[in-house]
Image (tube, rainbow, N blue to C red):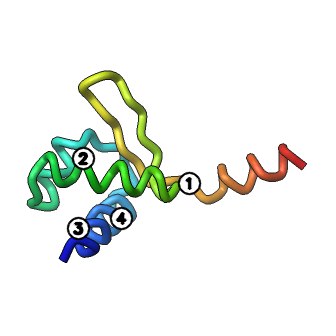
Amino acid sequence: MAEDIKEKIINFLKNTNKTYNVKELAVSIGVSYPTVLKWVEVLKAENKVDVQDYGNVKLVSLKNKNSEEEKVENLE
């Protein structure tokens, strides 16, 4: 059940390919704000989403695979 919410967030972000704040994300997938906030933090820790934190507003977008590859190349 809990992993389903994580998958809903990932699938929603993949299909829209936009940046959303946590409240918009919660309304769009039909899950409570605190639950979405928790799973966004989990996804951030797993390095699957980017979160821009502006205090009480957090903007969430899907992690761009190409940017990760570029970062690794720049380190080498």
Residue wearing tag 1: 64
The tag earlier along the polypeptide, 1 or 3, is 3
Location of residue 12 in the rendering, given as x and y in whole percent from the top left corner: 29, 63
In the foreground, 24 or 46: 46
The residue depicted at 24 percent of the width and 47 percent of the height is 37
Circle 4 or circle 2, nearest the eye: 2
Res 11 → quadrant: bottom left
Badge 1 amino acid: Asn
The tag earlier along the polypeptide, 2 or 3, is 3
User: As drawn, is 29 to the left or to the right of 46?
Assistant: left
Say what secondary structure mark 1 lies in: loop
Badge 2 amino acid: Leu
The residue depicted at 90 percent of the width and 49 percent of the height is 76
From mark 4 to mark 2, how far is it between C-alphas?
13 Å
Residues packed near mark 2 inside 10 Å, few (<14), some (14 to 19) or many (20 plus)? some
User: As drawn, is 65 to the left or to the right of 55?
Assistant: right
Location of residue 18 in the rendering, given as x and y in whole percent from the top left corner: 37, 49
Residue wearing tag 3: 5
The tag earlier along the polypeptide, 2 or 1, is 2
From mark 2 to mark 3, how far is it between C-alphas?
11 Å
The tag earlier along the polypeptide, 4 or 2, is 4
Say what secondary structure mark 4 lies in: helix
Residue wearing tag 4: 10
User: As drawn, is 14 to the left or to the right of 68?
Assistant: left
From mark 4 to mark 1, how far is it between C-alphas?
12 Å
Badge 3 amino acid: Ile
The tag earlier along the polypeptide, 4 or 3, is 3
Residue wearing tag 2: 37
Circle 2 or circle 1, nearest the eye: 2
From mark 4 to mark 3, how far is it between C-alphas?
9 Å
Check whether the beta carbons of the residues at disc 2 and disc 1 lie within 8 A of each other.
no
